Amino acid sequence: MIRELHQKLIDRSISDVDLVNGYFKTIEEKDPVINAFLSLNKEEALIQAKKVDEKIKEGKEIHLLEGIPFAVKDNMLAKDLKATAGSKILENYIATYDAFVIKKLKKENAILIGKTNLDEFAMGSSTENSAFFPTKNPCDTERVPGGSSGGSAAAVASKMVSFALGSDTGGSIRQPASFCGVVGFKPTYGAVSRSGLIAMASSLDVIGPITQSVEDAIVVFKAIAGQDKMDSTSFDLSASKDKKWKFNEVKIGVPEEYFAEGVDSEVKQAIQTTLQKLKKEGAQLQKIQITHDSYALPCYYIIMPAEVSTNLARYDGIRYARPAASEKIKNLQELYFQTRGLGFGTEVKRRLILGTYVLSKGYYDAYYKKAQKVRALICQEWEQAFQKVDFVITPTTPTVAFKLNEKTQNPLSMYLSDILTVGANISGIPGINLKNSETKSGLPVGLQILGSRFSDYSLLNFAKEVEELIHEG
Amino acid sequence: MDFKEINHLLELAHLTLTEEEKTKINEDLPQILDYVGQLSEVNTDKIEPMNGGTTNLENVVRDDNVDKEREQCQEDLKEAAFSRKGDYFKVPPVF
């Protein structure tokens, strides 16, 4: 936990060099099995840790995050370090500038210790689509950690790092957090700048923290949030709603569709148990219906690939390091086809074809425009729901972590593992995953809390109360 | 959707597929299109399609000034290119 580590550093009960070395030692022990990291930043991290130690020795004040080691998903840029996005096409790409979130964390003197694995360009729900290797779930290494921020979730869950950043386009922070039993927070769209995040689907992508507690998520979110001139969709959130919630003044919406068929009964039961606990504490539970939310996933699988197909057009073999340098390329056209044909993996290609299809002449109205209309409808319905209730509680995922290779042959079944998270991306609202409990076989069950747009701090404070209630047992 | 259509889409997307990928994607795509096709059930008669995002922001512009910080980055970006000549990116012949 960040505050405790900070306290230890200023008490000088541990030096920052020892702290950072300790994490690298854990990585050495655990990562050969887990495979959460794509690259490490050891030398630089230790230089920074030394500086922090000197500062403390001189009696200077340090920031809350100063000297605290963190990791980032490898689709965010940190200057002079590789940023592969989990793809062969960027295998040798070295970032030329810092992402906004990295700039912010560097300002706090937090220490970047490594870049974590992901599904190629964040496209997937299991981290098996990484062009390099799959990451394993620390709770059961025969299972996937979820995705696409699977490396970040697995690293935090196995305590190889204090906290990590992920990105969430359809559930890619919350779903792996759920599978690995950690906290994952997807902020309101635009609350964190996307500058320096390798774009997947620009109207859906959000960066957020993966942490060991809600308290840590609040600390990290405060550090990375804010308006940025490099991202015109970003804005400042006011932290003024920093209120402490009393359960007897909270109205919680429970959407029936989120507990319907297809959601594992043990998962359902576990979330219901927490809901009953909340009711006992005085919270008002209210059944709600987001009529068109069941269309959020099909809507997503039109809008997202459409945006993917435009965003990934930039990988043309000219502006970035090229995967396979072929001497025999005759003309420009051939360079494009060869670079992209060799550089992208199957899932990325599948989505590029799908996106090209839904945007092409004759299909645009039936698919893309239709999806944008349905999206507008879903947004309205969520907005209306939050006029009646303060928060909505659901399971984060329909099942607990599945086995490696279980869904790789059937893309549609893989897509369905985002069915309970994707509504928040379509409508731009914030959502958080908390570890609710464990199944009989010891796998984490995740609880999702959703709030209205811009209610991030309010949602985080409520989540902290729920977390405490869950821990009380 | 058949092979012919996929070939056309590959042209548009500047992509190639291995034979194995072609077989697989040819199987998957109709299933996925069938799944997303359920949107046609939704009545959207009076609904305006969403454009832009979910933030309510409009017409965000920046001052028309040279940003020194961004200027510095230019050299690094050129350096990242696969092949360059001075300030130009070097590419194979167009034809």
Image: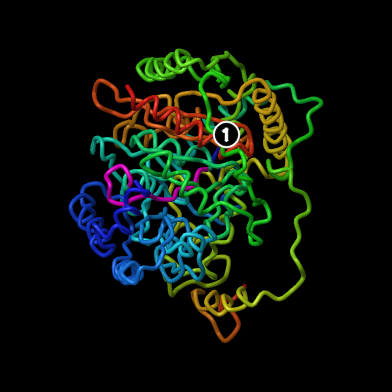
Vertical order, A224 against B5 (above or below): below
Amino acid at circle 1:
Ala
Residue A159 located within the stretch drawn in magenta = yes
Left or right: B73 with respect to B61? left
Vertical order, A105 against A429 (above or below): below
Image position, residue A401 (x, y; %): 33, 31
Residue A424 located within the stretch drawn in magenta = no
Stretch in magenta = A156-168
Residues A140 and B14: in front is: A140
* Residue that protrudes farthest toward the left in the picture: A29
Image quadrant assignment for residue A85: bottom left
10 Å neighbourhood of mark 1: few (<14), some, or many (≥20)? many
Q: Which residue does the image show at 63% across and 59% down from the upper left?
A: A228
* Residue that protrudes farthest toward the front in the picture: A59
Image position, residue A31 (x, y; %): 23, 51
- Name the residue beneath numbered marker 1: A424
Vertical order, A309 against A105 (above or below): above
Q: Which residue does the image show at 56% across and 71% down from the upper left?
A: A331
Residues A324 and A124: in front is: A124
